[in-house]
């Protein structure tokens, strides 16, 4: 959606722009001024080299969900917001995994 290689705080929603260096004003920060711009992330290349390296989507999904919850210090509601799913979805999936792990 942005033809350039950088996204400025002015292009972000206020909640996210406030997290950028310099806050919502885009004025840069005292420690390590980045000029108010956030460099677009790069997409990591696929590291697998053989079909055996392909994992089931269910396993990849579980890893992504558990990692998001860990990054949110165990806050399932916050992780759900970042993953753009309902917290109930995460609670339901985790309950299913707990049942499967117990068997």
Image (cartoon, helix red, strand yellow):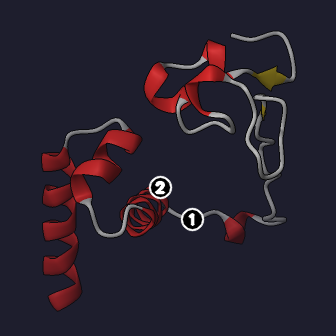
| Label 1 close to label 2 by CB (< 8 Å) | yes
Residue at 62% in and 21% down: 25
Q: Quadrant of the N terminus?
A: top right
Mark 1–mark 2 Cα distance, whole angstroms, equals 6 Å
Name the spot of residue 2 as percent of width and height, x first. Answer: 75, 11
- Looking at the rendering, which quadrant does residue 97 occupy? bottom left
Q: Which residue is mark 1?
A: 55
Q: Horizontal placement of 70 versus 92: left or right?
A: right
Sort mark 2 into few (<14), some (14-19) or many (20+) by Cα contacts within 10 Å: few
Residue at 49% in and 19% down: 13
Above or below, 20 relative to 51: above
Name the spot of residue 21 as percent of width and height, x first. Answer: 69, 39
Q: Which residue is mark 2?
A: 57
Residue furthest toward the front? 30
* Badge 2 element: helix
Above or below, 99 relative to 22: below
Name the spot of residue 74 as percent of width and height, x first. Answer: 29, 69
- Looking at the rendering, which quadrant does residue 75 occupy? bottom left
Q: Is residue 103 visible?
A: no
Residue at 40% in and 69% down: 70
Q: Horizontal placement of 44 versus 22: left or right?
A: right
Q: Which mark is residue 15?
A: none
Q: Quadrant of the C terminus?
A: bottom left
Q: Horizontal placement of 101 versus 68: left or right?
A: left
Name the spot of residue 31 as percent of width and height, x first. Answer: 78, 52
Q: Is residue 81 visible?
A: yes
Sort mark 1 into few (<14), some (14-19) or many (20+) by Cα contacts within 10 Å: few
Of residues 96 and 81, the one nearer the viewer is: 81
């Amino acid at each position: 959606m942005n033809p350039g290689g950088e996204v400025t705080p002015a292009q972000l929603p206020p909640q996210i722009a406030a997290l950028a260096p310099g806050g919502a004003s885009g004025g840069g920060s005292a420690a390590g001024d980045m000029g108010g711009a956030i460099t677009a992330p790069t997409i990591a290349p696929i590291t697998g080299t053989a079909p055996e390296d392909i994992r089931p989507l269910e396993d990849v999904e579980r890893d992504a969900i558990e990692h998001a919850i860990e990054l949110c210090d165990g806050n399932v509601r916050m992780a759900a917001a970042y993953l753009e799913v309902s917290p109930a979805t995460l609670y339901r999936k985790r309950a299913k995994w707990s049942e499967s792990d117990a068997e």
